[in-house]
Amino acid sequence: MDSKRIIHSTNVSRGHYICLMEIQKIEDDLFVLIGDAYDSNSTLLVHGSDALLIEGMATRRDALELQGFVEKEMHKSVRFLVCTHYFSDHLAALKLFPAGEIIAQENYIHTFQSELYRTEEEQGNFAEPTILFSERLSLRWGRFHLQMFHNSGHTMSTINIDIPEADLIHVGDNLVGNMVYLKYSAPALLFRALENIQRKGRKRLLSSHSGIRDASAVDLAQHYLAELEKRAQTSWAENAGDSIPKIALDDCYPGGTQGTPFENIFHKRNLQSIVERRLFQ
């Protein structure tokens, strides 16, 4: 993924470097802040002098810029941090807001321990959640009614957050771009997770990387997974799976849709998972 980000419009210098975090104002009390590392984001919901964050950036540097924006520019105090699945590319800010309650699904530690790729810095970003729930948790936050629900797809602890007042659903990493990632899950879980998201009927969608987009991305992800299944099954039947590594991403999308370089990286990893785990046989 391109590491260059849009420079924050105020061009504020934080210490010895320029702020690289992209700030998207969605509504007066709703912002999406996108970090330099992996495009990992944090969603900011404002209520009076308080703030609620969904996700916490991937690196210490991005987390410090998030902290500076929330506390020094917005003059808000973080009261809650919601973690959608507890992989380390979303945990960097957890220790920067010690007064904030950390909300997660009860299987969070399974997800954290199952992570295959983690730097020493990312390991150090871990912080215990203070509020755990199993299936559903509702939270009134200003004008927003956050409906958090367990939606295991990307991981066993993944939660999604429905925000009706913003016509928005936060899907964590149940979507990666316009597709899904099989590394830590099973196809059946991902099919079900996509159906659960679609059932909410929201027009806007936000995953844990990049900014808000149209919820039609769920249709693309469903098409991708179904077509990948069909092509993999054909390969298993005809040539013992030998042609699976040659399945092209664009062939798994509807006509006219092209995959991004970022999506191609994860598509190749999906093909590897299919072969190694003999998925779709």
Image (spheres, grey):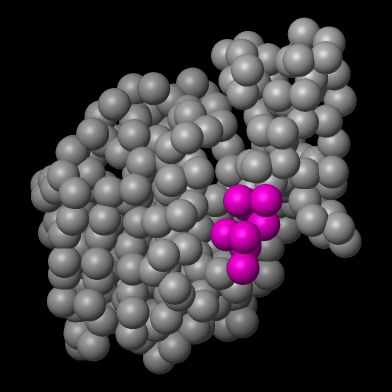
Magenta stretch, residue numbers: 216-223
Front residue (pair 2, 162): 162
Count of labels in the image = 0
Front residue (pair 111, 243): 243
**Is residue 137 rendered to the left or right of residue 245?**
left
Rendered image quadrant of residue 265: top right
Q: Position of residue 203 (x, y in %)?
A: 51, 78
Q: Quadrant of the C terminus?
A: top right
Q: Residue at x 83, y 10 (%)?
A: 239
Is 217 part of what is drawn in magenta? yes
Rendered position, 234 above or below 7: above
Q: Residue at x 50, y 83 (%)?
A: 25
Rendered position, 6 above or below 87: below
Q: Residue at x 65, y 42 (%)?
A: 226
Q: Position of residue 139 (x, y in %)?
A: 16, 70
Is 114 part of what is drawn in magenta? no
